[in-house]
Amino acid sequence: MRDPYAHDPLERRPGRGQRGPRVFAPGDLKLLILSMLAEQPGHGYDLIRQIEKLFDGSYSPSPGVIYPTLNFLEEAELISGQVQGSKRLYGITDAGRQALTEQAVALDGVRMRIDVSKRALRGHDRPPEIHEAVGNLRHALHMHSGHWTPEEIERVRGLLNETAKAIASGPAAPVTEIPHE
């Protein structure tokens, strides 16, 4: 029986008109755009290019994703758009800055997921052993459901974030043996 997690080298990569892997979790793109506009105002096209640069060219959001997100943020009064010729220049509002401050931890998570996604988009497929370990993690979190104290939430959050950072940073240096005293 074929391993459902094994990578098929003949499997087609997504092309024009086909969806690739999901890059952003719900709300991630809104938060990322808000943070970019907090740094400097920009047009939709500018934001597309900035995001593409964040992903080292391996991902570029489509206008069909960016412009509805900008419309949502503008309707929520988190950003404002000013007409400049045939384009709109977007900038963050005071309400947007406040929302960004309140979502600082979530924004750190978005940036960490971008680092992880860059590797995946470059074709670093996960081996079956890693799929198994991820499944074990999901199972452990599911089994833990309903028993979350504030201390336990912080403990598990710390473990998961540190693990994600360690994985995203790449292979670890070889461990040298500690001399016995």
Image (cartoon, rainbow, N blue to C red):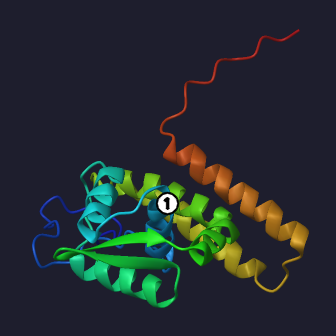
In the image, residue 74 above or below residue 59: below
In the image, residue 130 above or below residue 65: above
User: Which residue is at a point 81% across and 64% down the rendered structure image?
Assistant: 154
Q: Is residue 29 left or right of residue 67?
A: right
- Quadrant of the image occupied by residue 104: bottom right
Quadrant location of the C terminus in the rendered image: top right
The residue at which mark 1 appears reads as 113
155 or 132: nearer the eye? 155
User: Which residue is at a point 72% across and 56% down the rendered structure image?
Assistant: 159
> Disc 1 on helix, strand or loop?
helix
Q: Is residue 150 left or right of residue 114?
A: right
Q: Position of residue 114 (x, y in %)?
A: 44, 58
Quadrant location of the N terminus in the rendered image: bottom left
User: Which residue is at a point 51% across and 57% down the rendered structure image?
Assistant: 111
Amino acid on which the number 1 mark rests in the picture: Arg
Q: Position of residue 121 (x, y in %)?
A: 30, 57
Q: Position of residue 36 (x, y in %)?
A: 45, 60
41 or 126: nearer the eye? 41
